[in-house]
Every structure is written in structure tokens, then in C-alpha cells.
Amino acid sequence: MTGLPEVRVTRYVTPLREGGSLPGIVEAEDLGTYVCKFRGAGQGPRVLVAEVVVAGLARLLEIPTPDQVVLDLDPEIARYEADEEVQDLINASAGPNLGIDFLPGSFGYDPTTIPDGELAGRVLWLDAFTANVDRSWRNPNLLVWRGTLQAIDHGASLYFHHSWPGSPGDPQRFAVQPYDISEHILRSHVAAARAQDAALVARLDDAALGEVLASVPDVWLEPVPGAATAQELRDRYVRFLGARRDSAERTRPWLPTDAGDGVGR
């Protein structure tokens, strides 16, 4: 069950030695070039789930983000790689991996870039909603492509699912968890985030969240206590995200406040 297109990898091009997951540039049978996030990387498939879910939410909120596909990876490709680390990663990632459209000519966001204010506010709002801890001055995870800001690398979001192998967790705890904006690269756009809050919340009803989760391949949704099937895992994500969404209607404990405050509330 997946709403993402599926394509077969035809060639591994080069590694992107950024962070600990060692993503790589690959070519696929549709003649596309993709950044491949490997299922067999040390952080595991939950990072891929976060990538798909948050990218899906971004699209609902009209935040540009590169297209995604499921990349079918044959471990035979590893035979042609001299780097043993890459060989091991490909062999550990046979089957479905995440492909993110490679944007030729894009460049990294820097402090001299002046983004569209409303768009920057939506990115900040999305990061607060999904508890994304990785959009700082050190690592913006933003690209500028054809003059438009693109949000990328969402794997550090949705921290709550990393505790599920030991405990189902509490959606209400996530619902009221404040969000620290002290190092967020778009922290100056708090006013734009707050001004759009009601409209953004309205776009994320349970049906919309369910459609986003439907794009996650079953194989990445590993059974955990209390959720033995992929659909039960999808329903749990909807409950956690729904609880955080609904908290915004009452107390907004995670919604960013003035940029000088650091923590959202």
C-alpha cells in the first residue's frame, strides 16, 4: 500500500557524505535522478516514515518540497561499488527505499536569502507541529530552486515514534510538548506562523492525515506493541498528529511565540 510512484534503481552514482545516514545519488529506470535515503541505514525505516509523512503535510500546507518515489534497489548494484561502506549499505537496503527528486541547479539557503514571509511562516509552523529539531543555522535543510524555497530532510521530525518499540506512548504528551525555536533558521517569522495557524490547522483533518499516512509503504511500518499491522501503525500516527493539531484549538502550547522567547510557550 503506497501512494508514491515506484521505480527501479539502475545505477548508484555517488554518496552524499552528510550526517550519519550516507544518502546517495542514484539513477532510476524512469530516467530520473534521486537522492536515495536507504532503509538499511543506521537510523532505520522510521526516518523514512518521517520523511514521507512530513513531506506530505508540507504539500497540504503549500510548502514546496521535492517529489518522492519508492526506489526498488537490487543488491547486485553493490558489486560495482569500490567503497565497502556503500556496498554494505546497499546490501542492507534491498527492496524499497526512499527517493527524493534531485533538483539540479538548486543551492543551499543562507542568511542573506530573503524568503517569502508567509511561506517562511508556514515552514516554521510545520516544524513546530512535527517537532522537527533539524532546521538550524548550522543545518538549514532548505534549498532555493528556481527562485523558490524548498523544504528538505524531514527525518528528524516525529520523535515520538522512536519510543514505540518499548511503549505505545501518549498522544497527549506530544500534543502539549513545547517547541524550541531558539536556533531555528526562520525564527524571525513567528508572526507569519501565528497569523496562519487557524488556516493551517483546518487543512489537517483526520482524513487528510490518513491520506498522508497511506503514502508510507507497509514494509517501513514495523510492528510495535499494540500495533501489529501497518494500518494500526498508520492509525497511531494519525492519533498523535491529531492530538497535537487539536491542542492548537485550545492552548497552542507548541505554537511559536515571539522569536526572543526561545521555547514556543
Image: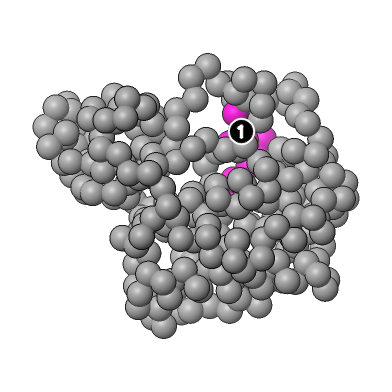
Q: How many marks?
A: 1
Crowd rating for badge 1 (residues with CA inside 10 Å; few <14, some 14–19, many 20+): many
Tell me if I can see residue 85 in this picture. no
Viewed as shown, does residue 135 lie left or right of 66? right
Q: Residue at x 41, y 83 (%)?
A: 226
Residue 138 position, x and y percent, is 62, 35
Looking at the rendering, the stretch of residues picked out in magenta corresponds to: 133-143
Answer above or below: position of 223 versus 53.
below
Answer above or below: position of 77 versus 72.
above
Secondary structure state at the residue bearing disc 1:
strand
Viewed as shown, does residue 15 lie left or right of 262? left
Rendered-image quadrant of the C terminus: bottom right
Answer above or below: position of 219 versus 243.
above
- The type of colouring in the image is one colour
The amino acid type of the residue labelled 1 equals Gln
Viewed as shown, does residue 102 lie left or right of 114? left
Name the one closer to the observer, 260 or 107.
107
Q: Main secondary structure of the magenta part?
A: loop
117 inside magenta stretch: no
Name the one closer to the observer, 109 or 196.
196
Residue of label 1 = 150
Residue 34 position, x and y percent, is 38, 31
Residue 244 position, x and y percent, is 68, 68
